[in-house]
Image (spheres, rainbow, N blue to C red):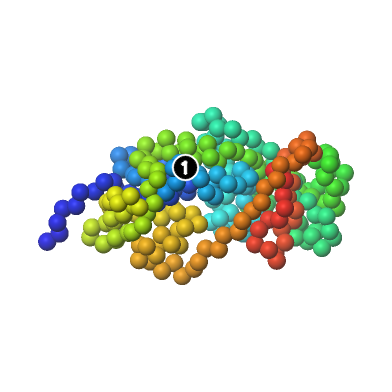
Amino acid sequence: MVRDVAYDCDVLVIGGGIVGLSTAYAITRAAPGTRVTVLEKEPGPARHQTGRNSGVIHSGIYYRPGSLKARYAVRGAAEMVKFCAEYGIAHEVTGKLIVATERDELPRLHALVQRGRENGIPVRELGPAQISEYEPEVRGLAAIHVGTTGICDYGAVAERLADASGAEVRYGAEVVRIDRRAALGVAVRTADGAVVRGKALVNCAGLQCDRVAMLAGDDPEMRIVPFRGEYFDLARPELVRGLVYPVPDPAFPFLGVHLT
């Protein structure tokens, strides 16, 4: 005999960054009437990675053609611009230069051209003189211009997703325990002692999602190792019109020093 359970929601989402809030937004649109609760340990949305980045709307040029990452990045860039326009969020499709300054970077730059075109991204190859048409203060042997890259205010995007989703968003709700049972759903205890019950749980805890997975009894078989980035303001912002990136170095797991 299975006892009746009083659920607080149908879907419980852990994490109030852009992934958690967009998940809540998507669920309530795909299945109107679904009760969604989002638990976020900070006092507001986007307090971690979502609100601590350079605000780039990435085109998808770096990703393997046909991969989910490539498809979602290309589609997501268009959807993000549409979302920002619909809700009046600050954004701009600036385009981006990827610049080669050494000869050994040229083959990798050409490979990005091919990859971008296979992903359906507008890419223009540039010589030294053409680079200055886009960025007068930038010098290089060659470059490519990616037309669909842009920038936006992701903190504002997260706030709008929270409001537009219709979900109950609880801030200051740090998850400390998860009890998951196949027939009963999940019960989550927060640091203040509250218990929230849901039929399903979605882990969107960002850099903490491996820890949340373990709280739920899962073995993620991996560990998240975050990288810290440093940000500087240009003393002369007029030196850069849009976004300027180096050719990625495969020896490093990030895109190098870039200007946005």
Residue 232 vs residue 29: left or right?
right
User: Residue at (61%, 56%) from the top-left corner?
Assistant: 228
Circle 1: residue type:
Pro
Q: Is residue 249 above or below residue 148?
A: below
In the rendered image, residue 100, in percent from the top left (x then y), is placed at 80, 54
The part of the image, by quadrant, that contains residue 96 is top right
Q: Quadrant of the N terminus?
A: bottom left
User: Residue at (71%, 56%) from the top-left corner?
Assistant: 256
User: Residue at (56%, 55%) from the top-left corner?
Assistant: 69
Which residue is nearer to you in this view: 18 or 62?
18
In the rendered image, residue 215, in percent from the top left (x then y), is placed at 37, 62
Tally of numbered tags: 1
In the rendered image, residue 224, in percent from the top left (x then y), is placed at 52, 63
Q: Which residue is mark 1?
A: 45
In the rendered image, residue 190, in percent from the top left (x then y), is placed at 34, 52
Asked which secondary structure carries label 1, the reply is: loop
The part of the image, by quadrant, that contains residue 164 is top left
Which residue is nearer to you in this view: 61 or 6?
6
Which residue is nearer to you in this view: 212 or 145?
212
Residue 15 vs residue 55: left or right?
left
Q: Residues within 10 Å of mark 1 (few under 14, many from 20)?
A: many
Q: Is residue 25 above or below residue 222?
A: above
Outermost residue to the front: 192
